[in-house]
Image (cartoon, rainbow, N blue to C red):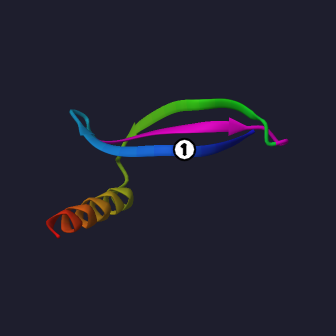
Amino acid sequence: MKKLLTSFTSHVTGEGQRISFTYSEVDENGKLRNQNLRENFIVLDEELQGHIDAVNNFIKRRMEG
């Protein structure tokens, strides 16, 4: 069974920075077995937090024109 990421988002909650994501499961023949499965986690890894900050800063600069 292969898991295919279909979407993700980063947002701040009371616990801290959170990543929420959805994915589908496909079998070895390419048949979709499960879809729109959801998980999330609190970001504790500093490297990952740096990547999130970089994306947020990119978006802010783009919004400023």
Camera-nearest residue between 17 and 58: 58
The residue most toward the front is 65
Residue at the image point whose x is 75% and y is 38% from the top: 1
Residue 45 higher or lower than 47, as above or below: above
- At which x and y percent is residue 57? 23, 64
- At which x and y percent is residue 59? 26, 62
**Does residue 2 belong to the magenta stretch?**
no
Residue 29 higher or lower than 14, as above or below: below
- At which x and y percent is residue 4? 63, 45
Disc 1 marks a residue whose amino acid type is Thr
Disc 1 element: strand
Question: What is the chief secondary structure element of the magenta stretch?
Answer: strand
- The residue tagged 1 is 6
Residue 65 higher or lower than 30, as above or below: below
Residue at the image point whose x is 29% and y is 65% from the top: 54
Q: Which image quarter: residue 18?
A: top left
Q: Which image quarter: residue 26?
A: top right
**Does residue 18 belong to the magenta stretch?**
yes
Residue at the image point whose x is 48% and y is 33% from the top: 39
Q: Which image quarter: residue 35?
A: top right
Which range is magenta? 17-29
Residue at the image point whose x is 37% and y is 53% from the top: 45
The residue most toward the right is 29
Q: Does residue 52 appear left or right of residue 1 in this picture?
A: left
Q: Does residue 10 appear left or right of residue 65 in this picture?
A: right
Q: Does residue 53 appear left or right of residue 2 in this picture?
A: left
